Amino acid sequence: MEKATVIGAGLAGCEAAWQLARRGIPVTLIEMKPGKFTPAHRSAGFAELVCSNSLRSDQLTNAVGLLKEEMRQLGSVIMRCADETRVPAGGALAVDRAAFSEKVTRAMRTHPLIEVAEREVCELPDSPVIIATGPLTSDALAQRIAALEGLETLNFYDAAAPIVSGESLDMSRVFRQGRYGRGDDYLNCPMNREEYEAFYRALLDAEKAEVHGFDGTQVFEGCMPIEVMAARGEMVMAFGPMKPVGLVDPRTGREPYAAVQLRAENREGTMYNLVGFQTRLKWGEQRRVFSMIPGLEHAEFLRYGVMHRNTFLHSPGFLDEHYQMIARPGTYFAGQMTGVEGYVESASSGLVAGVSLARRMLGLEPVDFTDLTAIGALAHHVAHAAGDFQPMNANFGLIAPYERRIRNKQERYGHIAARSLNVIEALRSNPLACDFCEEARC
């Protein structure tokens, strides 16, 4: 059997390698860590989560929740490991990031058909190959990719939120509560108007770290630095990550003027990240300004927020709906480099690319997941989006509309989700797509 190559052991690369191997395809999974690290990565493990430990909503009436369930049904190793390492996060799926990475790494290193090679790739290898080197692709390989005929390579920037020690929080000021009484998975730091206005002014005046080429306009909206958000207007934060709606401060019995939410980073609750507080402030400024948040006056910062480059392809016209290069069959891309945005979306592109390459190598027709599913709609968007192509999260706007008009949005989304899962089930039960069965072998 011919061997496939997967470059990059992030979420997309690991998912792609797994999907190939479970179909009997031997794989070489190449990862440049630990010999070389990007500015954002710290761990030698695979599938390292560098921005947040949340994989976002797990509800079927949320598009990313639907995408997760589709991936579970399709045998995703990333979803299996995430489910096994989840930490409390209300209606979201958040994971213990160290345990999650360890499980994914073990799955890759112990699979008999996956060979791990630790080295940097500087040249585009021959097909069959999946390039899943992510938003921080090394300069040498990025230059080779950028030189591909007809390709426009774009840059924008991602930012990560700080993490603080749980035992350093002042719990006399912090209260545990989910919005609208939905569990108690979040810690909340309430602010009155005076505290919010002082924090806002301090944030505007704080010194930012230099990020080469960044002018404040190239950041993805879903990962916007808190200081960029503040610069857009005094109340932007209060209607964004600091919105108080659905919360009641037990000390006052009223909704606070604003609130900062903290989410557990691990099962033990010894570490918490500041939800929505991605930043490029200098580290000393992060300590000074964020210590103004009630309850964080003496917080121990276990990790400061960082900002880094994020590179993605102009995929429409360059990739098809299987994430395959149109001009170079047998060469696939996966992950955020393709223009999908988010952990789950990246893994989903790896799943589609891995399934598609495996079926190509087995002499089978590719599977079109169609725009009736979240996983297929995202792939179709990457391949066929019109206009100014920008990174995209999973959303119901990408999925084909429901056949019957339903005014209530949640009810409509529920029907779309049920239809999507029916499509996935039909694929799994189709004898011509036998590689989706539990013991996938064709």
Image (cartoon, rainbow, N blue to C red):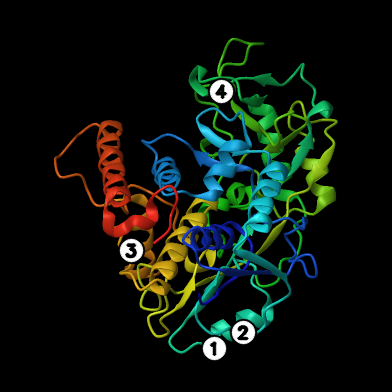
- Residue holding disc 2: 143
Amino acid type at image mark 2:
Gln
| CB contact under 8 Å: marks 2 and 3 | no
- Residue holding disc 4: 178
Disc 1: CA contacts within 10 A as few (<14), some (14-19) or many (>=20)? few
| CB contact under 8 Å: marks 4 and 3 | no
Image spot of residue 342 (x, y percent): 52, 53
Disc 3: CA contacts within 10 A as few (<14), some (14-19) or many (>=20)? many
Q: Indicate the secondary structure of the residue bearing disc 2.
A: helix
- Residue holding disc 1: 147
Image spot of residue 267 (x, y percent): 70, 30
* Marks 4, 3: nearer the viewer: 3
| CB contact under 8 Å: marks 2 and 1 | yes
* Marks 2, 4: nearer the viewer: 2
Closer to the camera in the image, 313 or 106: 106
Q: Distance between the residues labelled 2 and 1?
A: 6 Å
Q: Which tag, 1 or 3, sits closer to the chain's start? A: 1
Q: Indicate the secondary structure of the residue bearing disc 4.
A: loop
From what the image shows, is residue 320 above or below residue 421?
below
Amino acid type at image mark 3:
His
- Residue holding disc 3: 380
Disc 4: CA contacts within 10 A as few (<14), some (14-19) or many (>=20)? many
Image spot of residue 379 (x, y percent): 38, 62
Q: Indicate the secondary structure of the residue bearing disc 3.
A: helix
